[in-house]
Image (cartoon, grey):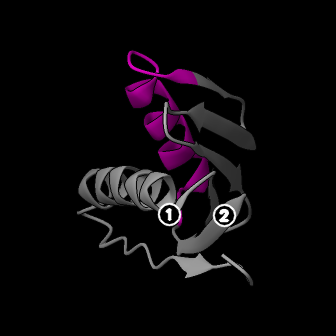
Amino acid sequence: MLTSQAEVATERPQRYLAQLCKHFAHKADSEHDEEKGHVEFDVGRCDMHAEDRTLLLRARAEDREGIERVKQVVGTHLERFGARDELAVQWTDAEGS
């Protein structure tokens, strides 16, 4: 399993977590509460956790193509949703990924 993560600084991590999960719910299995959520795509999964001023994202997939797709889809959507707040998503691949 390949993994990659991003820590996105924001004053409103809960808002963006909910917005991402709700947005993807019409295409993928998605659940969330105030602190955590996930989206299960055909090619992989993204787990999310809202902390004090950070939205933690963890992408997982079986292959390189899948993980790159999850990172691209989640990252571009979050940056678009957070354009006013100038959100930037920088992924870091886990060891061995």
Whether 93 is drawn above or below 39: the answer is below
Residue 37 drawn at (x, y percent): 68, 37
* Numbered tag placed on residue 2 in the rendering: 2
Q: In the rendered structure, does residue 74 fall within the stretch colored magenta?
A: no
Residue 35 drawn at (x, y percent): 75, 44
Q: Look at label 2 and name its amino acid.
A: Leu
Whether 46 is drawn above or below 91: the answer is above
Magenta range: 11-29
**Which residue is painted at 42% across and 72% down in the image?**
89
Quadrant showing the C terminus? bottom right
Q: Secondary structure at mark 2?
A: strand
Residue where numbered disc 1 is placed: 64
Evaluate if marks 2 and 1 touch, with contact meaning CB atoms under 8 Å apart.
yes
Q: Secondary structure at mark 1?
A: helix
Direction from residue 87 to residue 46 in the image, left or right? right
Whether 36 is drawn above or below 63: the answer is above
Quadrant showing the N terminus? bottom right
Residue 59 drawn at (x, y percent): 60, 57
Q: Earlier in the sequence, mark 2 or mark 1?
A: 2
**Which residue is painted at 67% across and 47% down in the image?**
47
Tell me which corner region of the image, top left, top right, bottom left or bottom right, holds residue 78.
bottom left
Report the magenta stretch's main SS: helix
Q: Look at label 1 and name its amino acid.
A: Arg
